[in-house]
Amino acid sequence: PPGDAEMLYAFDRVFLPIAREFSPDLVLVSAGFDAAPGDPLGGCRVSPSGFYRITKQLMGLADGKVVLAQEGGYNVESNSESMAACTQALLGDDEPEGSQLLGFNVVDERDAQPAAVCHVSTVETARKHYAQWWECLRP
């Protein structure tokens, strides 16, 4: 399942270039954390540190005007820890070093690896598709 590397790859290759070209005045995030470990529907494994890094990148848009609205999510513990990590990013605090939740600090050899090839391929396909509307995605 997709984790930090895959989410950040998609964020860097598709979302951020489009967001920069769009140049929003304000960034509103519907923060449900379905991609967090333990969510029964998301099936992903984006860690609180991954959400922290995404939030830090969002702060580079709209002169740092970012609103995170907690919503949804189906695992109270993962929602809490992920939102806390995002709040740390907004406050300028250091990235969380580890999770307080059982099962969130499982060492996976993929954690130190780049994004999985199948996810890279999907992101690059999406990038090519959206390039018809967004100049920033064109070669």
Image (spheres, rainbow, N blue to C red):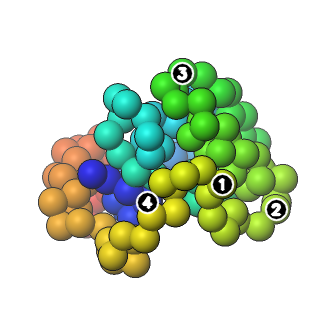
Is residue 21 among what the camera can see?
Answer: no
Q: Residue shown at 72%/45% (left/top)?
A: 84
Find out whether the residues at labels 2 and 4 contact each other: C-beta distance under 8 Å.
no
The circle on residue 100 is 1
Amino acid at circle 2: Asp
Total number of numbered discs in the rendering:
4
Q: CA distance from mark 4 to mark 1?
A: 18 Å
* Residue that numbered label 3 is attached to: 72
Q: CA distance from mark 2 to mark 4?
A: 20 Å
Question: In front here: 81 or 31?
Answer: 81
* Residue that numbered label 4 is attached to: 4
Q: Is residue 90 left or right of residue 29?
A: right
- The image position of residue 99, as x and y in percent, is 62, 57
* Residue that numbered label 2 is attached to: 93
Q: Residue furthest front?
A: 102
Amino acid at circle 4: Asp
Between disc 2 and disc 3, whose residue precedes? 3
The circle on residue 18 is none
- Mark 1 Cα-neighbour bin, 10 Å: few <14, some 14–19, many ≥20: few
Q: Nearer the viewer, mark 4 or mark 1?
A: 1
Q: CA distance from mark 2 to mark 3?
A: 25 Å
Between disc 4 and disc 3, whose residue precedes? 4
Q: Residue furthest top?
A: 72
- Mark 4 Cα-neighbour bin, 10 Å: few <14, some 14–19, many ≥20: many
- Whether residue 138 is situated above or below residue 39 in the rendered picture: below
Amino acid at circle 1: Gln
Find out whether the residues at labels 2 and 1 contact each other: C-beta distance under 8 Å.
no
Q: Is residue 76 left or right of residue 45?
A: right
Q: Quadrant of residue 133?
A: top left
- The image position of residue 116, as x and y in percent, is 23, 66
- Mark 2 Cα-neighbour bin, 10 Å: few <14, some 14–19, many ≥20: few
Find out whether the residues at labels 4 and 3 contact each other: C-beta distance under 8 Å.
no
